[in-house]
Amino acid sequence: MEFEEEKQTAKPVFDEEAASALAKELRATFASAKTRSYQWRESQLKSLLKLTTSNEPAIVDALRSDLSKPELESQVYEISMLKNSCKLALKELRNWMKPEKAKTSLTTFPSSAEIVSEPLGVILIISAWNYPFLLSLDPVVGAIAAGNAVVLKPSELAPATSSLLAKLVGEYMDSSSIRVVEGAVAETSALLEQKWDKICYTGNGRVGRIVMTSAAKHLTPVLLELGGKSPVVVDSGINLQVATRRIIVGKWGCNNGQACISPDYIVTTKDFAPKLVDSLKCELENFYGKNPLESKDLSRIVNSNHFARLIKLLDEDKVSGKIVLGGERDKTNLRIAPTILLDVSRDSLIMNEEIFGPLLPILTVDRVEESFDLINSGTKPLAAYLFTNNKKLKEHFVRTVSAGGLVVNDTTIHLAVPSLPFGGVGESGMGAYHGKFSFDAFSHKKAVVYRGFAGDASVRYPPYTKGKLRLLKALIGGGILSIIRALFGWSKA
């Protein structure tokens, strides 16, 4: 009897059959045109805003459970940013949905044209563990605003947040159009076997390749938000204290380095490096105390696997002797102190994979301009940062460094500018979202031309003649003078 009761309450298996049924159900909802109306989009965006506003303590608790994330970081970088996304979408939605007028040419005269934004269909969003609330629901804002049905797969590495998302989305959102699927590799694989109209994935390049391979089977477009080694170039002649504080808050103040746009390494000159190291030591102690392992203002490492990966980077023979600050670790509580390494070898493990943790190598060059060649010798990062007062150096940085986004004299803040696209390039990702870019990412831009029955020109119809050829060539490729010459037979066919 006890076995039967346990069997009845067991969680249903989510396999390919279940994934297929879910996709079919949401596709039927989308086909009914329910999600296309302004009223539905507005109601769901309002529900998402209410979901967030009404459950802030529960969201903070879940993030603390998953990552020991400080409340300030949870409130500012996850909750407030999502609320702002919802509010912006609600404010601008009517404008975003309006057809955009387009110019027509003499070739199609008389006519008018417009670009109509239409929803793609059913969207699969696969989220990450490091900002598990924001990175799950921020793409959902764009997908809803664009009029799509959505399946959200949160990361199993942030189980408390994943469970909370499933509960809240089920309570607040339209379950006929927006669903959450919890689980790990098996569930994600089952979802990836289905045909979607777009897949949005946030995570690492290895899984990004798996997602893209699965999408290719169905010719499904993808939006990949990946990562990379985001560099910070530090010039001399700057306000060093301000620069240091901004580097620290972008590195350790963003989930203890577990953020895709966190500074991954610093490049500065040999002469300036000692001053920079001293400033980092001073400000890190001011922020996190003499024993940062006990600081309540630093997140922990997400799990033991990632902890072991970071310790392997730190304990490599060619790296372990380069530590100038930190290096302490607490395996039981999954904590690693903010760690600075000076002049690490460029062929070391730490310089050949994204660190995604509290370790910060500093590389030195003779001239600061050399740093740009160093950056460009690797794969294109998701972000790159420069601290300088030199106008020519700023211009050179913007002109020569290819990255998803650039910031001069700060770190990570471009993420908070809704009028800017957020996305990668090359191995750091493809596609972009945020603000209007989110709406566009999940919309098809449909070209529409309107004509009446007047002004029908026989020149386009058979039988073809040299005179018609002359006139059509002039209409398509020439100006008014060419058309006049063709009408009078003054131009060669």
Image (tube, rainbow, N blue to C red):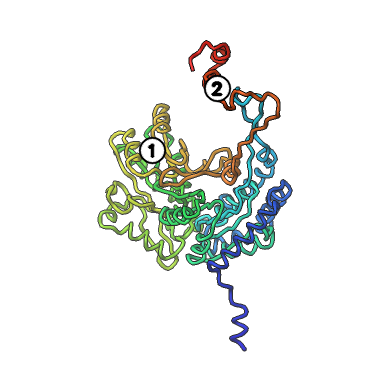
The residue lying furthest to the right in this view is: 39
Foreground residue among 453 and 45: 453
Residue shown at 47% from the left, 42% from the top: 411
Relative image position of residue 134 (x, y in whole percent): 57, 53
Q: Can residue 282 be seen by looking at this rendering?
A: no
Left or right of 347? Residue 442 is: right
Left or right of 128? Residue 360 is: left
Q: Looking at the image, do the residues carrying marks 2 and 1 touch, with CB atoms under 8 Å apart? A: no
Foreground residue among 213 and 355: 213
Left or right of 172? Residue 241 is: left
Amino acid at pointer 1 = Val
Relative image position of residue 258 (x, y in whole percent): 45, 54
Q: CA distance from mark 2 to mark 1?
A: 59 Å
Query: Can you identify the residue that label 2 sits on?
Result: 472
Q: Quadrant of the N terminus?
A: bottom right
Amino acid at pointer 2 = Leu
Relative image position of residue 58 (x, y in whole percent): 63, 62
The residue lying furthest to the left in this view is: 317
Q: Is residue 404 above or below residue 463?
A: below
* Neighbourhood count class around disc 2 (C-alpha, 10 Å): few under 14, some 14–19, many 20 upward: some
- Mark toward the start of the polypeptide (2 vs 1): 1
Provide the secondary structure element on which disc 1 rests.
strand
Q: Can residue 62 be seen by looking at this rendering?
A: yes
- The disc label shown at residue 234, or none: 1
* Neighbourhood count class around disc 1 (C-alpha, 10 Å): few under 14, some 14–19, many 20 upward: many
Provide the secondary structure element on which disc 2 rests.
helix
Which mark's residue is nearer the viewer, 2 or 1? 2
Relative image position of residue 48 (x, y in whole percent): 67, 53
Residue shown at 42% from the left, 53% from the top: 205
**Res 456 quadrant in image:** top right
